[in-house]
């Protein structure tokens, strides 16, 4: 019985802690770091020019993936390459947390 | 004066032509059926690596066209997206882009 309770407590702790560990981005820090991004993507993630993607409301994990792909060269874009070159993983997670927390993009579904 | 009127008239004639180059959202909705298999399921994950499939409702038309053509032409890489895009003509790409751009909070859906 004690073991069972212990397992329950441990499992609860793990469940509570895991989202924090997986989503390490800090939106406030991201907002501060986004000042260079806003020239094209807008501070709230609504792009200034239609050639550039809106980021507002985009999935956090997708923004992280996109930025890391630009940094590694898997995704190629001359403008983005120069901006992401010096970003740390933490910077990327913070930026993703900021833009994903804004209202904007939506999932599509057949209506 | 007549010259100015003529030039203005010509510009007015040309403008709708430029906007007509954009896709047809009604056609796009039909052509976008396959896309909803991934992009139409809220929170759907790509796997290996794991990340959420991007939201494209309300995305900019021009950006969507650029992205789809980059997948089709092999400049942007994703196995599923490259395969899907290879079957699309320029017109198809413009149509689905128009449909997605009109969805979401940035425009009226239908």
Image (cartoon, coloured by chain):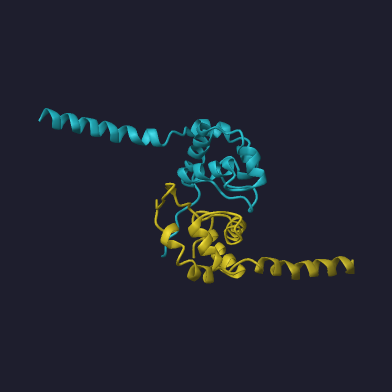
Chain colours: A cyan, B yellow
B47 left or right of B17 in image: left
The x, y position of residue B8, in whole percent, is 81, 66
Q: Pick the quarter of the image with the C terminus of chain A.
A: bottom left
The x, y position of residue B7, in whole percent, is 83, 67
Using the rendered image of the protein, determine whether residue A87 is visible from the camera's viewpoint. Answer: yes
User: In the picture shown, does residue A27 fall above or below B30?
Assistant: above
- Residue closest to the eye, B18 or A30: A30
Q: Residue at x 56, y 49 (%)?
A: A54
Q: Pick the quarter of the image with the N terminus of chain A.
A: top left
Q: Residue at x 43, y 62 (%)?
A: B36
Using the rendered image of the protein, determine whether residue B57 is visible from the camera's viewpoint. Answer: no
**Rendering quarter of residue B40:** bottom left
The x, y position of residue B32, in whole percent, is 49, 66
B62 left or right of B31 in image: right
Q: Residue at x 50, y 39 (%)?
A: A96
- Residue closest to the eye, B97 or B88: B88
């Amino acid at each position: 019985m004690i073991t069972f309770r212990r397992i329950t407590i441990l499992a609860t702790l793990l469940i509570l802690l895991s989202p924090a560990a997986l989503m390490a981005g800090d939106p406030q820090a991201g907002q501060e770091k986004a000042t260079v991004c806003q020239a094209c993507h807008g501070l709230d993630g609504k792009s200034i020019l239609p050639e550039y993607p809106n980021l507002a409301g985009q999935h956090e994990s997708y923004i992280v993936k996109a930025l890391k792909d630009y940094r590694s060269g898997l995704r190629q874009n001359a403008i983005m390459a120069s901006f992401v070159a010096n970003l740390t993983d933490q910077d990327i997670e913070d930026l993703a947390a900021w833009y994903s927390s804004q209202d904007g993009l939506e999932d599509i579904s057949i209506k | 004066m007549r010259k100015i009127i003529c030039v203005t008239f010509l510009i007015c004639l040309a403008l709708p032509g430029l906007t007509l180059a954009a896709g047809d959202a009604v056609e796009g909705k039909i052509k976008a059926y396959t896309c909803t298999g991934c992009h139409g399921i809220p929170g759907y994950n790509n796997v290996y690596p794991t990340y959420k499939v991007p939201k494209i409702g309300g995305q900019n038309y021009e950006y969507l066209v650029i992205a789809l053509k980059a997948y089709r032409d092999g400049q942007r890489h994703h196995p599923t997206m490259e395969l899907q895009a290879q079957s699309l003509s320029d017109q198809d790409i413009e149509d689905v882009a128009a449909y997605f751009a009109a969805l979401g909070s940035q425009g009226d859906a239908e």
